[in-house]
Image (cartoon, grey):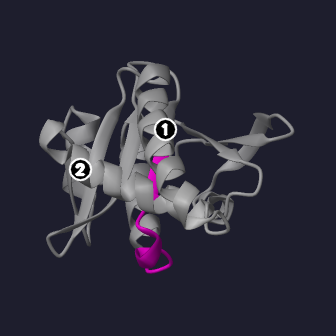
Amino acid sequence: MNPDPIAALLDTLADMQARVAGQADRAALRQIVGADTGEMLTGVPASARALLIGAQVEGRLSALMRDHPLASILLLSHAGRPIGLLILDWPSTGPVTLVDLTLLPELRRRGHGTSALSALCAVADRFGRSLRARLFYDNPAHRLLDRTGFVPVGGTVLDIVKERAPVNLPLTC
């Protein structure tokens, strides 16, 4: 077993590639977050939309790094094209936080999110770690998390915290 959980995750992803994002990937990260933000702002007039998307992208990325300074940002690719990002805060103890899993809107509902989350669950199971995620109450990703064993454990009126306990894998000889 690879002792580094992030490296183990990179090795576990089946139908896509992933790497730890670096400075050279900033434009791809902005594109992915911008596309996601743009989808949420479809009813906003075009003149204001571009300005709002730019502010949201920088604010969202900055907030993620402020709130999770040790988080790993993974750039997900398929067929050589960046398709999404996966941000994980994997502390030495306690639950692993799934900070963000975002795919380009046009590539959703094609199994990429399920594949990435299944790989994450498999690695968390190997390391005996629970996973935690916080989602806005109407986020469609709730269904994906529910399918992979996440259950509500808390939250507020606006967001729900879900957690997935590690599944004990049978020992093989």
Disc 2 element: helix
Q: Is residue 157 left or right of residue 20?
A: right
Q: Position of residue 141 (x, y in %)?
A: 61, 60
Residue at position x 51%, y 43% in the image: 56
Disc 1 element: helix
Determine which residue is flagged by label 1.
Answer: 60
Give the extent of the magenta segment.
100-110
For residue 150, the mark is: none
53 is higher (above) or lower (below) than 140: above
Q: Is residue 3 left or right of residue 90?
A: left
Q: Is residue 103 magenta?
A: yes
Residue 148 seen from this side: yes
Determine which residue is flagged by label 2.
Answer: 27
Residue at position x 67%, y 68% in the image: 43
163 is higher (above) or lower (below) than 169: above
> In the image as oriented, which residue stretches furthest toward the bottom?
110
Q: Is residue 121 left or right of residue 16?
A: right
Location of residue 14 (image quadrant): bottom left
Q: Amino acid at mark 2?
A: Ala
> In the image as oriented, which residue stretches furthest toward the front?
47
Contact (CB < 8 A) between labels 2 and 1? no
Marks 2 and 1 sit apart, C-alpha to C-alpha, by 14 Å
Front position in the image: 164 or 136:
136
Residue at position x 48%, y 38% in the image: 60
Front position in the image: 70 or 130:
70
Front position in the image: 3 or 104:
104
Q: Position of residue 124 (x, y in %)?
A: 42, 42
